[in-house]
Image: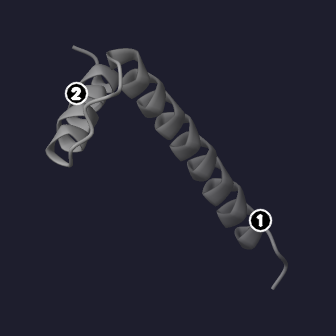
């Protein structure tokens, strides 16, 4: 089982515990894919900010 599939299962279980039962398995997979992409973008943004901060003359 892939990490994304495991994350989708965890998301489905957590939402079910909170009363959400109306989403299809593909919805959970799509949500996880979007979250992973947003985390990648955040990671790249933070790395770029760190590099920009390190390259400023002192």
Is 48 positioned to the left or the right of 38 in the image?
Answer: right
Toward which corner of the image does residue 49 lie, by quadrant? bottom right
Query: Badge 2 local density, few (<14 within 10 Å), some, or many (20+)?
Result: some
**Disc marking residue 12:** none
Can you tell which of label 2 and label 1 is closer to the viewer?
2
In depth, the one of 51 and 49 nearer the eye is 49
Residue that carries the numbered disc 1 in the rendered image? 52
Q: Name the residue at the bottom extreme.
A: 58
Where is the C terminus found, in terms of image quarters? bottom right
Identify the residue at image location x=56%, y=50%. Answer: 43
Q: Who's the residue at 40% across and 22% down the image? A: 29
* Left or right of residue 1: residue 44: right
Q: Position of residue 32 (x, y in %)?
A: 42, 32
- Say few, some or many: other residues with alpha carbon within 10 Å of mark 1 (under 14 / 14 to 19 / 20 or more): few
Is tag 2's residue or tag 1's residue first in the polypeptide sequence? 2
Number of numbered discs on residues: 2
| Furthest-right residue in this view | 57
Looking at the image, which is closer to me, 32 or 55? 32
- Residue 46: x, y in percent? 62, 59
Above or below, comparing residue 54 to residue 12 in the picture: below
Helix, strand or loop under label 2: helix
Rendered residue at 20%/43% (across/down): 14
Q: Secondary structure at mark 1?
A: helix
Question: In the rendered view of the protein, which quadrant contains the N terminus?
Answer: top left
Is the image coloured rainbow, by chain, by secondary structure, or in one colour? Answer: one colour
For the residues labelled 2 and 1, say whether their Cβ atoms are less than 8 Å apart.
no
User: Of residues 57 and 28, which is closer to you in this image?
Assistant: 28
Q: Nearer the viewer, residue 53 or 4?
A: 4
Label 2 to label 1, Cα distance in Å?
A: 38 Å
Task: Identify the residue shown where x is 17% and y is 35%.
Answer: 13
The label on residue 9 is 2
Q: Is residue 52 left or right of residue 34?
A: right
């Amino acid at each position: 089982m892939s990490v994304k599939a495991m994350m989708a299962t965890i998301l489905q279980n957590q939402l079910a515990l909170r009363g959400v039962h109306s989403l299809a398995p593909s919805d959970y997979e799509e949500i996880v894919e979007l979250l992973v992409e947003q985390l990648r973008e955040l990671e790249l943004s933070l790395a770029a900010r760190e590099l920009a901060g390190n390259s400023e003359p002192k």
